[in-house]
């Protein structure tokens, strides 16, 4: 056992990783996992959420309290997946990315983001300012991580901006009303910040 293995903190994910490593060595288990993944029914996922929130509200509140740890776990998992995916051929990744966009319910995702934004606005207006301060800190930390990773990946910011501009132009052509709403909301937020700082 090397030094890296001896310093791993024991816990749920560490134990799950050890078990999963052994289990996935079995071909029949791998095939069973593929079958399960092919037969997911996301349209019924709301049933799970309702069962969790309505059957035992206290358990649900405990889950909500653990969301930061769960979010951190998903961030770490996502980081590992991205690192592994980067080893595939660009042509294959291009096809997979197009399929991912086509199959993902981005309309509902947009609605979820809007609901989160609306909740943040309501809490910020009726709370004591903690949410607004937390969002400001979140923006700073996100920007720091974003910049550091671009530097690590040796990606020029101008190249990234060119890609974003091309994507934004496509969005404007397909959904001009949505873009106008976003721009108007952005202007209103900037004016609000300016008014508070005057």
Image (cartoon, rainbow, N blue to C red):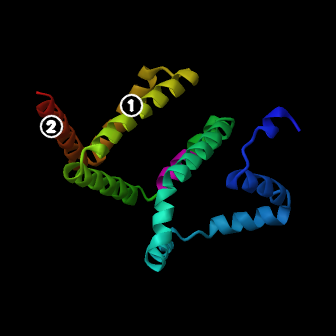
- Number of residues whose C-alpha sits closer than 10 Å to that of mark 2, classed few (under 14), some (14–19) or many (20 or more): few
Is 103 rendered above or below residue 189? below
Look at mark 1 in the image and give the residue it sits on.
140
Tell me where the magenta segment starts and ends, as one range. Answer: 96-103
Residue drawn at (38%, 31%) of the image = 140
Look at mark 2 in the image and give the residue it sits on.
192
Residue drawn at (19%, 39%) of the image = 189
Q: Is residue 43 visible?
A: no
35 left or right of 183? right
- Number of residues whose C-alpha sits closer than 10 Å to that of mark 1, classed few (under 14), some (14–19) or many (20 or more): few
129 left or right of 138? left
Magenta span: chief secondary structure: helix
Residue drawn at (17%, 42%) of the image = 184
Residue 187 place in picture, x, y as percent:
17, 36
Is 144 rendered above or below residue 40? above
Q: Quadrant of the N terminus?
A: top right
Instruction: Indicate the secondary structure of the residue bearing disc 2.
Output: helix
Q: Quadrant of the C terminus?
A: top left
Residue 141 place in picture, x, y as percent:
43, 32
Tags 2 and 1 in contact by the CB under 8 Å rule?
A: no
**N-terminal of the two: label 2 or label 1?**
1
Residue 39 place in picture, x, y as percent:
62, 70
Q: How many marks?
A: 2
């Amino acid at each position: 056992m090397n030094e890296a293995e001896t310093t791993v903190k024991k816990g749920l994910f560490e134990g799950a990783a050890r078990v999963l490593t052994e289990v996935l060595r079995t071909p029949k288990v791998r095939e069973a996992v593929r079958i399960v993944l092919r037969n997911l029914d996301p349209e019924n996922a709301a049933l799970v959420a309702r069962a969790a929130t309505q059957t035992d509200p206290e358990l649900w509140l405990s889950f909500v309290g653990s969301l930061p740890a769960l979010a951190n776990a998903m961030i770490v998992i996502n980081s590992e997946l991205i690192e592994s995916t980067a080893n595939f051929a660009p042509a294959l990744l291009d096809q997979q990315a197009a399929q991912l966009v086509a199959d993902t319910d981005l309309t509902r995702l947009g609605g979820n983001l809007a609901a989160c934004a609306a909740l943040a606005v309501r809490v910020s207006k009726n709370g004591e300012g903690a949410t607004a301060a937390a969002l400001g800190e979140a923006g700073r930390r996100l920007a720091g991580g974003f910049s550091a990773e671009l530097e690590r990946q040796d990606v020029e910011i101008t190249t990234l901006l060119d890609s974003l501009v091309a994507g934004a132009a496509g969005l404007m052509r397909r959904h001009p009303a949505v873009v106008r709403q976003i721009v108007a909301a952005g202007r209103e937020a900037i004016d609000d910040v300016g008014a508070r700082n005057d």
